[in-house]
């Protein structure tokens, strides 16, 4: 199973990932990124990869769990 990894020291909560993959990422009311679902299924992989590639801070990665 692949999982989403976030470097919260780099994340600036600009919601790019939420826009692309709202099933996995959400900016909360306090402006912090929440990972709604860290698991990446084969079905989700393409959209999560897009979100990872679109993060302007390079804060996201997909790792093998
Ligand atoms: S796209 Fe990157 S910087 Fe923006 S909220 Fe998501 S993880 Fe954070």
Image (cartoon, helix red, strand yellow):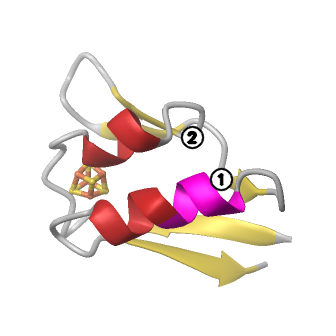
Q: Mark 1 points at which residue?
A: 38
Q: Are marks 1 and 2 in contact (CB under 8 Å)?
A: yes
The majority secondary structure of the magenta stretch comes to helix
Among the 4 quarters of the image, the one containing residue 62:
bottom right
Among the two numbered marks 1 and 2 on one chain, the one whose residue lies closer to the N terminus: 2
Query: In the image, what residue occupies the spot 76% across and 72% down?
Result: 2
Observer-nearest residue: 26 or 32?
Answer: 26
The C terminus - image quarter: bottom right
Residue 50: x %, y % from top left: 45, 61
24 horizontally vs 2: left or right: left
What distance separates the C-alpha of mark 1 from that of mark 2? Answer: 7 Å
- Mark 1 vs mark 2: give the one in front: 2
Query: In the image, what residue occupies the spot 74% across and 55% down?
Result: 39
Label 1, ligand 1: CB separation under 8 Å: no
For the image, the number of numbered tags is 2
Observer-nearest residue: 65 or 52?
Answer: 52
């Amino acid at each position: 199973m692949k999982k989403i990894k976030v470097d919260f020291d780099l994340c600036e909560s600009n919601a790019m990932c939420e826009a692309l993959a709202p099933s996995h990422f959400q900016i909360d009311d306090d402006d912090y990124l929440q990972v709604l679902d860290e698991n990446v299924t084969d079905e989700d992989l393409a959209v999560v990869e897009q979100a990872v590639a679109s993060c302007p801070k390079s804060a996201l990665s997909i790792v093998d769990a």
